[in-house]
Amino acid sequence: MNYQTARKFLIAQTITTEENPDSLLMHMHQGKPPVPGQITSILLALKVVFAELQNAIAIDKELACALYMLSVKTQQLFVAGRKAGVNWPPIFKEDLLRIAIAVESIFSGDWKTL
């Protein structure tokens, strides 16, 4: 996966329209778990973006918004879903934490792990 593909993929994961029914945020809005392999693909894309932007001084606004939504909005949707009785997959919470840590790594320029 190259940077442009990773960037487009991450942005697509935050689009919540009927034209993009398999985005992570769309699934979470609907109380559905991620598509199999989706979290792995997101984490891979985040690592590719990190490698490309590690020494960058700025990040484009569209990507920054997508990164924010993947790290913060997913956590909010997870909590809201749990309160509404959604039974999320067992390791989904940890997966969302890994995504948030990867996003923090992109912003800081220093790769962090759990």
Image: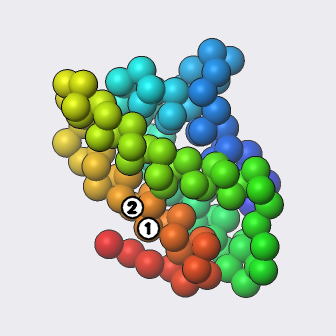
The front one of 29 and 22 is 29
- Image point 63% across, 15% down: which residue? 18
Q: Can residue 96 be seen by looking at this rendering?
A: yes
Quarter containing the N terminus: bottom right
Name the residue at the top extreme.
18
Residue 81 appears in which quarter of the rendering?
A: top left
Residue 47: x and y in percent read 57, 66
Residue on which the image places disc 2: 98
Query: What SS does tag 1 mark?
Result: helix
The residue at 64%/65% (across/down) is: 48
Q: Residues within 10 Å of mark 1 (few under 14, many from 20)?
A: some
Q: Is residue 40 left or right of residue 79?
A: right
* Residue 86: x %, y % from top left: 24, 26
**On screen, residue 77 above or below 59:** above
Name the spot of residue 59 as percent of width and height, x first: 76, 67
List the residue tagged with mark 1: 101
